[in-house]
Image (cartoon, rainbow, N blue to C red):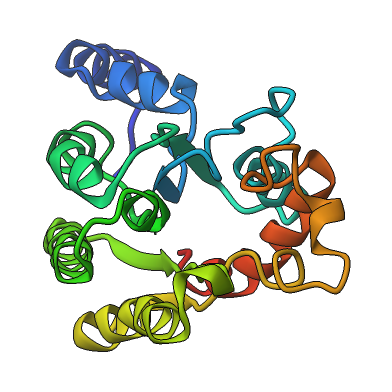
Amino acid sequence: MNLNRRHCIVLAANLAGSGIYRNAAAAASQPEHPANTILVLGDSLSAEYGLKRGTGWVALLEQKLQIEKIRAEVVNASISGDTTSGGRTRLPALLAQHQPTLVVIELGANDALRGLPLALTQDNLLAMTRLAQQSGARVLLLGMQMPPNYGRDYGQSFARMYADVAKATRAALVPFMLKGIADAPDSMAWFQADRIHPKEEAHPRILANVWPVLKKGLR
């Protein structure tokens, strides 16, 4: 089809009037959406308790994603002192607000510190994992282990709880997020004065434990 100059001008005017040009220009000007939205639902271990802002493992994760050139937004919804019951209560609103593609659940240690029943903790972890999966997100569980003074049987049951939840839901699992820190020969050198919260120097090790498994859950 041959178009003369007058026809081209009329066609361009009609396209502009229809909004096609405007929509294309608007789309080009909008920032690119991240391919991944990572929601971290944790307690003080992920909330930078006692640390300088920007030095915890979640902040280091953001830096790692940039270095790896992986488009992702990280939402840190961690609260110091939170339990699995608290996380279960907060999760529905967080899923609706942020629509994450990956949910990292780092909860359970405070349940043990408060003497809550393991069955309750496991039920909460199961519920959170399934709820996140139903929303379309993948789930990564960050497992914890209890100190020897809690008793061998309790310690084994607590650690196995995370594996059982991961197996039941086919969620990804980091068996022990503090591996190489809490079980190191010089473990106390890696913790703050309270002997509960890792120092800033320990958080790169935490990320090193988490990253290989987390990366597999990214788009």
Measured as percent of width and height from the top left, residue 118 is found at 23, 69
Measured as percent of width and height from the top left, residue 70 is found at 62, 53
Measured as percent of width and height from the top left, residue 30 is found at 44, 23
User: Which residue is rendered at x = 68% and y = 58% of the image?
Assistant: 207
Measured as percent of width and height from the top left, residue 98 is found at 28, 36
Query: Would you say 190 lies left or right of 109 here?
Result: right
- 215 versus 109 height, above or below: below
User: Which residue is rendered at x = 88% and y = 65% of the image?
Assistant: 186
Residue 147 location, quadrant: bottom right
* Quarter of the image with the N terminus in it: top left
- 1 versus 142 height, above or below: above
Query: Would you say 31 lies left or right of 9 here?
Result: right
Nearer to us in this view, 200 or 134: 200
- 86 versus 162 height, above or below: above
- 28 versus 103 height, above or below: above
User: Which residue is rendered at x = 21% and y = 31% of the image?
Assistant: 97
Nearer to us in this view, 219 or 42: 42
User: Which residue is rendered at x = 87% and y = 53% of the image?
Assistant: 189
Query: Would you say 186 lies left or right of 7 here?
Result: right
Nearer to us in this view, 16 or 199: 199
